[in-house]
């Protein structure tokens, strides 16, 4: 089997039954007296968490990252062992931390579950999937929380870890997961192994923000945590104090892991609902001829309203697209309660947000879109990072493609769009040709805001383009330049 590195396009052969135990044992032996931390999951959270731990503030650790030998994941293992971080970001600290870990030789990656047997701490940073039943227009008809992969991952830890090891879950999970799902798995596996006593199990959700402040969002930010008992909570606290600047960002202990799980899901659901709320005002403002950005800025001057969201293309990433559903599912399935209709409604609205940009494009251009040549700048769901998970660009791309448009995609952080199996051009200047009728800014990367070549191309372009800014990524000056020569629309601005 082959695993494709989406950052480079390189194809990596997945090993068939390669024995890793000796390499892992040798790695641990080369770091005597250092506690061993295994980070399960080497995605956008786990890989960065691993380098933060490898550069811990107050303790030296030997760190092993582990992921699956699958087409979707093995390339991350290979990349780390070959000296490349499996995430792309503008944060210079990531490369620095990774290089420091390589110099100290205290960070490796593997697919072998024997790593759990060597661990003093296991940090869980894996995805928990929500299967949505949606049509082509992203109308959410139903959903199911799929715990099968997550349970399997927990059982692999429980079947091998030391009884004294701390298992710290950072993944976003339905409230009640640690107590009602993970704890019984460990009890079952420990009983099979003849181990008396309970696992040290805690939950402390990450607040990772991919982008320029990636590392600081882990190392220099507030944490909420809890354990299934006092010993577990104390162990979590002791560990977190070694990697987080707790003198500036004190830890907050809650009474139970269910409380911390609920805290994370509520935190993200609030943000998702805020975005959904602004979407209907976006459409209202456009119809009323109002610039909603200046309205929001005026409202934000009031301290109680500083986090009112702005208009945009849509919601993407792993968290906000599904976390409100985790809460509603947990209420029904784990606590025999009622669903959370407002939280579910937010997801339904946000899933369909890109259709508004598509409608604006179709209304403004007026003539049939078939055969029209579009340049889409940005594939990632978030600016200044290469993350295409559940990107809202996908729905817009699909709609334009269905209309028969010819589409060129460019993103400085994405060489391969894994979900669409598409190669993406990373060099902006190479796509700045005269072969377009329309340009759509779909991700607010800094490169687009500050690129003189793009600005010059827009000035010198022969004829008139339609320029659509779906993410408020262009400055006032650039917008002014564009309007003097081209036709333009900005999502959320009804004033032109």
Image: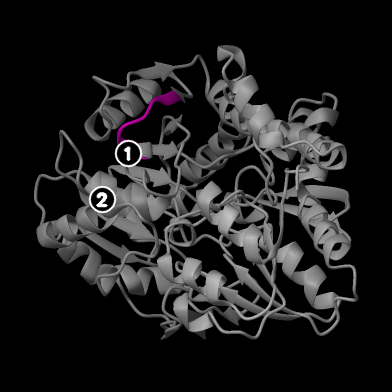
Q: How many marks?
A: 2
Within the image, what quadrant is residue 23 found in? bottom left
Q: Is 219 part of what is drawn in magenta?
A: yes
- Where does label 2 land, which residue? 93
Whether tag 1 and tag 2 are in contact, CB under 8 A, the answer is yes
Q: Position of residue 371 (x, y in %)?
A: 81, 85
Label 2's element? helix
Q: Is 133 part of what is drawn in magenta?
A: no
The residue positioned 47% from the left and 71% from the top of the image is 456
Q: Furthest residue to the front?
A: 484
The residue positioned 79% from the left and 48% from the top of the image is 144
Distance between the alpha carbons at the discs numbered 1 and 2: 9 Å
Which sits in the foreground, 438 or 347? Answer: 438
Q: How is the image coloured?
A: one colour
Residue 273 in view (yes/no): yes
Which sits in the foreground, 325 or 434? Answer: 434
300 on left or right of 131: left
Q: Position of residue 85 (x, y in %)?
A: 33, 64
- Where does label 1 land, which residue? 216
Tell me if mark 2 has few (under 14), some (14-19) or many (20+) residues whose alpha carbon lies within 10 angstroms of its own: some
Of callouts 1 and 2, the N-terminal one: 2
Q: Which residues are magenta?
A: 218-225
Residue 270 in view (yes/no): no
Which sits in the foreground, 461 or 54? Answer: 461
The residue positioned 63% from the left and 60% from the top of the image is 484
Which sits in the foreground, 5 or 360? Answer: 360
Q: Position of residue 67 (x, y in %)?
A: 43, 63
Q: Position of residue 4 (x, y in %)?
A: 49, 80
């Amino acid at each position: 089997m082959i695993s494709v590195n989406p950052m480079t396009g390189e194809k990596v052969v997945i090993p068939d039954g390669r024995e890793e135990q000796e390499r892992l044992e040798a790695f641990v032996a080369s770091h005597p007296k250092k506690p061993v931390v295994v980070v399960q999951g080497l995605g956008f959270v786990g890989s960065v968490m691993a380098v933060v731990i490898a550069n811990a503030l107050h303790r030296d650790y030997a760190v092993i990252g582990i992921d699956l030998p699958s087409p979707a994941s093995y390339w991350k293992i290979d990349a780390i062992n070959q000296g490349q971080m499996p995430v792309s970001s503008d944060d210079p600290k990531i490369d620095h931390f990774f290089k420091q870990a390589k110099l100290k030789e205290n960070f490796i990656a593997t697919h072998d579950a024997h790593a759990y047997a060597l661990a003093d701490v296991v940090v869980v940073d894996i995805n928990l999937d929500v299967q949505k039943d949606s049509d082509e227009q992203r109308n959410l008809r139903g959903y199911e929380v799929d715990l099968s992969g997550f349970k399997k991952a927990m059982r692999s830890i429980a079947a091998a870890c030391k009884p004294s090891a701390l298992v710290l879950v950072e993944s976003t999970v339905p409230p009640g997961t640690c107590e009602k799902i993970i704890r019984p798995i460990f009890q079952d596996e420990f009983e099979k192994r003849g181990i008396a006593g309970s696992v040290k199990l805690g939950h402390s959700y990450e607040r990772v923000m991919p982008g320029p402040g990636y590392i600081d969002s882990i190392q220099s930010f507030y944490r909420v945590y809890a354990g299934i008992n006092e010993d577990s909570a104390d162990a979590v606290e002791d560990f977190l104090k070694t990697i987080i600047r707790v003198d500036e960002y004190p830890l907050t202990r809650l009474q139970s892991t269910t409380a911390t799980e609920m805290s994370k899901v509520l935190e993200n659901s609030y943000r998702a609902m805020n975005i959904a709320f602004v979407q209907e005002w976006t459409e209202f403002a456009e119809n009323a001829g109002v610039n909603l950005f200046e309205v929001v800025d005026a409202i934000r001057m009031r301290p109680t309203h500083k986090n009112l969201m702005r208009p945009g293309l849509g919601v993407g990433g792993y968290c906000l697209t599904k976390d409100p559903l985790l809460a509603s599912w947990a209420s029904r399935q784990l606590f025999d309660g009622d669903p959370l209709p407002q939280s579910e409604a937010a997801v339904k609205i946000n899933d369909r947000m890109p259709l508004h940009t598509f409608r604006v494009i179709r209304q403004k251009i007026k003539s049939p879109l078939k055969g029209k040549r579009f340049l889409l700048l940005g594939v990632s769901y978030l600016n200044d990072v290469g993350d295409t998970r559940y990107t809202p660009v996908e729905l817009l791309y699909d709609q334009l493609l269905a209309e028969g448009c010819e589409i060129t995609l460019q993103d400085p952080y994405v060489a391969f769009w894994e979900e669409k199996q598409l190669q993406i051009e990373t060099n902006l200047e190479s796509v700045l040709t005269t072969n377009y009728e329309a340009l759509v800014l779909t991700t607010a990367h800094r490169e687009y805001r500050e690129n003189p070549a793009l600005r010059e191309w827009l000035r010198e372009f022969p004829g008139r383009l339609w320029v659509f800014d779906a993410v408020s990524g262009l400055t006032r000056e650039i917008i002014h330049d564009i309007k003097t020569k081209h036709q333009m629309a900005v999502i959320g601005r009804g004033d032109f």
